[in-house]
Image: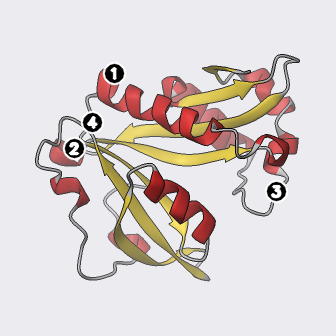
Amino acid sequence: MCSVRSFVTDDLFNFNHVNLDLLTETYNLPFYLRYLANWPEYFLSTQAPNGECMGYIMGKAEGVGENWHGHISAVTVAPRYRRLGLAAMLIDALEDITEQVADGYFVDLFVRKSNLLAINMYQKFGYVVYRRVIGYYGREEDAYDMRKAMKRDKDKKSMVPLDHPIYPEDLEHD
């Protein structure tokens, strides 16, 4: 049993056990604070009955026109709480916010090309590989830009894969 709630600044002192995992991208404190200040509705946490942070999702709304979308910047669950459906719960909540609040066309995310576990999970949730971004992770590893169309994209144009890779400097938004 857990609850999904808005992430608050105090959570920054209680989520190290979630971030201290090889599969989790971690960021500096100002990065987290910028998301809390600019997109608080896109920053959610799952909390155990004892108050422990079980996982979180951090995202934002960005783009213009038919590229207006929700973006998942990070989603992670503490190792001891994995395989309970928490990632699906957090992603569903972010997708709902993208549809109901932001009225976005799609949700996207970037994932390491080598992270097959995450890629398979996202595909299970309805995401497709839209394009490959060469050298996205510090020029050391490529990323997949994965997308899932929202109701506003009736023809699912946002999910039609590109037939060529791009470079980070070619991204529309960062």
Q: Amino acid at mark 3?
A: Asp
- What residue is shown with label 2? 64
Q: Looking at this view, is 85 or 9 the one in front?
A: 85
Image marks 3 and 1: residues in contact by CB distance under 8 Å? no
Q: Which residue is mark 4?
A: 104
Badge 2: residue crowd in 10 Å (few <14, some 14–19, many ≥20): few
Mark 4 neighbour class, 10 Å CA radius: few under 14, some 14 to 19, many 20 or more: many
Front in this rendered view, residue 4 or 168: 4
Q: State the image coordinates of residue 39 (x, y, percent, origin top left).
A: 49, 29
Q: Of helix, strand and loop, which one carries label 1?
A: helix
Mark 3 or 4, nearer chain start: 3
Instruction: Name the amino acid, label 1.
Output: Val
Crowd band around label 3 with a 10 angstrom C-alpha radius: few (<14), some (14–19), many (20+) = some
Q: Residue at the spot x=39%, y=78% of the render?
A: 167
SS for callout 3: loop
Distance from Cα at disc 3 to Cα at disc 2 = 35 Å
Q: Quadrant of residue 132?
A: bottom left
User: Picture coordinates of residue 118 (x, y %)?
Assistant: 59, 61
How many circles with numbers are drawn on the protein? Answer: 4
Indicate the position of residue 1 as horizontal and vertical percent values. 74, 21
> Which residue position holds label 3?
21
Residue placed under numbered mark 1 in the picture: 101
Which is closer to the viewer, label 3 or label 2?
3
Counting residues from the start of the chain, the first of labels 3 and 1 encountered is 3
Marking on residue 1: none
Q: CA distance from mark 3 to mark 4?
A: 31 Å
Label 2 is placed on what type of residue?
Val
